[in-house]
Amino acid sequence: MSSTVNKAAAGLLGTVFVLMSISIASEGIFHSETPEKPGYAIAAEEAGGEAAGAGEAAAAAVPIADLLAKADVKKGEAVFKKCQACHDGSKGGPNKVGPNLYGLVNRPIAGHEGFSYSAGMKDFSKGSSETWTFDHLNGFLSAPKKYVAGTAMGFAGIKKDEERADLIAYLATLADTPVPLPAPGQ
């Protein structure tokens, strides 16, 4: 071996030795004990558990038909302004970050032409056999990521039942032939 190869190997080994020594020394100096009880708990839903099948779970204790009986379309139009950053509601309007919502009620889930849906939404649609019923809209709008695992919709949801019902009643009017609201108690 030449002297330059020996010098390079010695330099490399010396550097590794110094770095390991510093690591061991700093670990001894800055070592902290693990607390007996963590300062915070992270609640995570298990895969395949409630998060995966949450679409079938009820979004709220009050049935959507009862909420829609008291819904105010004008208030729903005001709530829709939150949606307009990502969605358009006009007939023949463009897709934005999200699909156009004109004619949404009873439209096949992940079925708006010209929009590329997330894998989670496509899985939830079950090959377009599912439609946006009032119950699906209620569940999805209350917590999109919980209702449809893997959706790309980054909206946190509308927690207030009345506000959500107002929005759904307004969405039902966005159609050539608006879908009638279900009767209370159904």
Image (spheres, rainbow, N blue to C red):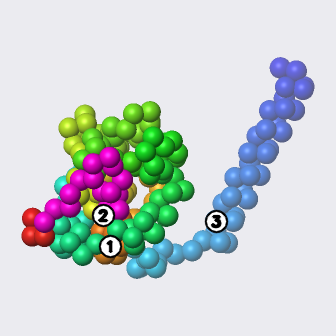
Q: Amino acid at mark 3?
A: Glu
Left of 170 or right of it: where is 19?
Answer: right
Viewer-closest of 36 and 13: 36
Q: Residues within 10 Å of mark 3 (few under 14, many from 20)?
A: few
Query: In the displayed structure, would residue 128 be above or below residue 157?
Result: above
What is the span of residues highlighted in magenta in the rendered image?
168-183
CA distance separating discs 3 and 2: 61 Å
Residue at x-position 32% and y-position 46%:
176
The answer to whether residue 126 of the structure is visible from this angle is: yes
Q: Are marks 1 and 2 in contact (CB under 8 Å)?
A: yes
On screen, residue 8 versus residue 39, left or right, reads right
Q: Position of residue 81 (x, y in %)?
A: 49, 64
Marker disc for residue 27: 3
How far apart marks 1 and 3 lie (CA) works out to 63 Å
Q: Is residue 78 above or below residue 130?
A: below
Measuring from the top left, give residue 45's x and y in whole percent: 30, 61
Q: Main secondary structure of the magenta part?
A: loop
What's the mark number on residue 135?
Answer: none
Relative to 175, is 84 on the left or the right? right
Q: Quick one: quadrant of the C terminus?
A: bottom left
Q: Nearer the viewer, residue 36 or 15?
A: 36
Residue 174 included in the magenta stretch of the image: yes
Q: Is residue 106 magenta?
A: no
Residue at disc 1, secondary structure: loop
Q: Among all residues in the image, which is located at the extreme front?
A: 176
Question: Which of the 4 image quarters holds residue 168?
Answer: bottom left
**Eye-nearest disc, 3 or 2:** 2
Which residue, given by chain and number where applicable, does mark 1 sit on? Answer: 72
Task: Name the residue that disc number 2 marks.
Answer: 169
* Mark 1 nearby-residue class (10 Å; few <14, some 14–19, many ≥20): some
Who's the residue at 17% across and 72% down the image? 66
SS under mark 2 = helix
